[in-house]
Image (cartoon, rainbow, N blue to C red):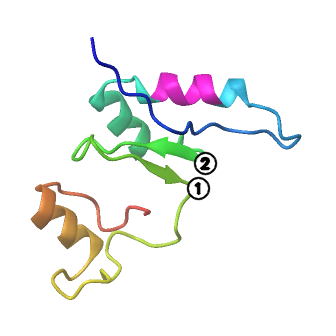
Amino acid sequence: QDRTFAPYVIGCLDAAGDIDWVRIRTTIAEFSRSSTAREYAAQGDSMVGPRIWSPSYNQGVSYIVYGPSGKLCSDPFPNEDYLSFQDYYAKKYGIEISPNGEM
């Protein structure tokens, strides 16, 4: 079997600069949840940053999320093709989100 190994590894460090195994285990456990469980967590207040996030509409992509951006889904989108973040997600992914949702 041919294997390819990544030339680097991303990990979490604690304030002392040591590997933060608790955060790594938590991240792996959260990432392993079902799509429904991840969507439920995103709708509540259990989103504590920083965390690795892989949205259900694009599971091949992961983001590092540090916390809320201070923007709402109804705020203007940075691209002129869409009126708001809500409009972007509706048109691009077919996802209906609340205009009052936090980004």
Task: Name the secondary structure under disc 1.
Answer: loop
Q: Are marks 2 and 1 in contact (CB under 8 Å)?
A: yes
* Amino acid at circle 1: Tyr
The image quadrant of residue 53 is: top left
| Residue most extreme to the right | 16
On whether residue 4 falls in the magenta region, the answer is no
Residue appearing at x 82%, y 33% in the figure: 18
For image coordinates 43% across by 30% down, the residue present is 31
Measured in 3D between alpha carbons, the distance from the residue under mark 2 to the one under mark 1, in whole angstroms, is: 4 Å
Relative to 4, say whether 83 is above or below. Answer: below
Q: Which residue position is annotated with label 1?
A: 66
Magenta part of the protein: which range?
A: 24-30
Q: Residues within 10 Å of mark 2 (few under 14, many from 20)?
A: few
- Choose top left, top right, bottom left or bottom right for residue 87: bottom left
Residue 94 on image: x %, y %: 10, 56
User: Residue 50 shows which numbered tag?
Assistant: 2
Farthest top residue in view: 1
Residue 41's disc is none
Mark positioned earlier in the residue sequence (2 or 1)? 2
Front residue of 22 and 48: 22
The x and y percentages for residue 41 are 43, 37
| Image height of 73 relative to 28, above or below | below
> Which quarter shows the C terminus?
bottom left
Percent across and percent down for residue 22 are: 69, 24
